[in-house]
Amino acid sequence: MLKIKDLDAYYGESIILRKICFDVKPGQVVGLVGRNGVGKTTFLKSIMGLVATPYGEISFNDKNIIKEISYKRAKMGIGYVPQGREIFPQLTVYENLILGLEVCDGKGQIDDEIFTLFPVLKDMLSRKGGDLSGGQQQQLAIARALVSKPHILILDEPTEGIQPSIIKDIGRVIKMLKEKGNMSILLVEQYLDFVLDLADYIYIMEKGEIVEKGAIDEIDKDNIKKKMAI
């Protein structure tokens, strides 16, 4: 599915990521955790082609995509929900969702499954995105990424600034997608318990490097919590 080897990433002249190796297998939920500022968001932007990555490989479905521009990566089936959601506040919920079909050249339609996953959105289709609460905007951002039926869904801090009830809803959605088994999910989070409850495999990042990794049922969770607290 997604395989990354010896990846470096830069902002200007500053190196942010060093020799990152990372795998997401088909149908797997993989967590990436670490304290603020260690490079997690830069790593996701590297996958999407939004920062300079002069060294390494990013393979998606056995194709090296490191030289592909961002929209082509999306068209290949990489769904991305950035930190901060980035919905269009002046567009309606429906218009925001329709934009998710642009990676399919505007073809297709919004599947009813979207409203099974996010029932609150069905009654808000005519409301402007900017009128939604932060939690509702997060649900809209995830739904927008899902309408194109990506092969992998990348979520950057989906629980940030969200009320507990919506966090539970987002966790429920991830579990439902995981049970279907036809989509991989890469989850970047600071809320460690959220990741431990959902992921099959986890990576820990410090200062732009992967310092530990392992299956959730085998890794030392107490050690991860210590690293997150330092």
Image (spheres, helix red, strand yellow):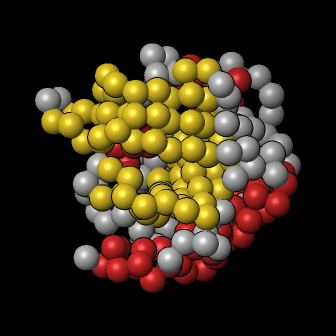
- Please state which of residues 147 and 217 is positioned toward the viewer in this rendering: 217
* Location of residue 167 (image quadrant): bottom right
- Please state which of residues 120 and 173 is positioned toward the viewer in this rendering: 173
Q: Is residue 92 above or below residue 52?
A: below
Residue 192 shows in this picture:
yes
Which of the image's four quarters has the N terminus? top right
Counting from the top left corner in percent of width and height, residue 33 is at 43, 63
The residue sitting at 39% across, 42% down in the picture is 20
* Location of residue 198 (image quadrant): bottom right
Residue 146 shows in this picture:
no
- Please state which of residues 85 and 7 is positioned toward the viewer in this rendering: 7
Which of the image's four quarters has the C terminus? bottom left
Counting from the top left corner in percent of width and height, residue 42 is at 34, 43
The residue sitting at 64% across, 51% down in the picture is 185
Q: Is residue 128 above or below residue 139?
A: above
* Location of residue 30 (image quadrant): bottom right
Q: Would residue 9 appear left or right of 62 to someone viewing this image? A: left
Q: Would residue 102 appear left or right of 54 to someone viewing this image? A: right
The residue sitting at 25% across, 42% down in the picture is 16
The residue sitting at 46% across, 34% down in the picture is 5
- Please state which of residues 72 and 96 is positioned toward the viewer in this rendering: 72
Count of residue discs? 0
Counting from the top left corner in percent of width and height, residue 24 is at 61, 45
The single residue placed furthest to the left in the displayed view is 13
Q: Would residue 112 appear left or right of 191 to someone viewing this image? A: right
